[in-house]
Amino acid sequence: MVLRALTFLLTLVVIFAGTRALVHALPGDPLQTLLAESATQLPPEVVRHELGLDRPFLTALVDDIGRALRGDWGISLLSRQPIAPVLLERFQRTLELAAAASAIGIVFALWMGLVAAGNPGGRMDRFC
């Protein structure tokens, strides 16, 4: 259990650090690209502060991880609404798709297993 928690935290740190490093590694000002793509009317200073681009890399990284662990996933630049409800709504649809895909996979796996078991040494048995 402890190992899984540590693995989760390490994965979280790697994802946050990698994402933040990629943003900083982009040529030019990543904020200008983001503002152009999102068509937001917010002043660049406000967005820079919200995204932590005005703070040192490690400070912003620790703040990001802390907020994520507390469940604060931020606010959308487009709608100015909290991101968590949007993600939860889409997560529900993702679970529905995953359940449907799993059901289809189980049906095909059972069928293939029965065909393979019914003809030992046959093509389906060797394929499976």
Image (cartoon, helix red, strand yellow):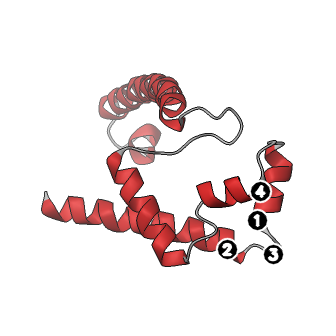
Q: In the image, which disc is placed on residue 24?
A: 2
The answer for how far apart the CA atoms under marks 1 and 3 are is 7 Å
Closer mark to the observer between disc 1 and disc 4: 4
Write the residue at 83% across / 73% down: 28
Q: Which secondary structure lies at badge 3?
A: loop
Badges 1 and 2: C-beta atoms under 8 Å apart?
yes
Which residue is at the front of the view, 39 or 11? Answer: 39
- Which quadrant would residue 121 be assigned to in this image? top left
Q: Which secondary structure lies at badge 4?
A: helix
Q: Disc 4 residue type?
A: Pro
Write the residue at 76% across / 61% down: 31
Left/right of residue 128 with respect to residue 28 in the rendered view: left
The answer for how far apart the CA atoms under marks 2 and 3 are is 8 Å
Q: Looking at the picture, does residue 27 appear above or below residue 39?
A: below
Q: Position of residue 2 (x, y in %)?
A: 14, 62
**Among numbered discs 4 and 3, the one appearing first in the sequence:** 3
Q: In the image, which disc is placed on residue 30?
A: 1
Q: Disc 2 residue type?
A: His
The answer for how far apart the CA atoms under marks 4 and 3 are is 17 Å
**Among numbered discs 1 and 2, the one appearing first in the sequence:** 2
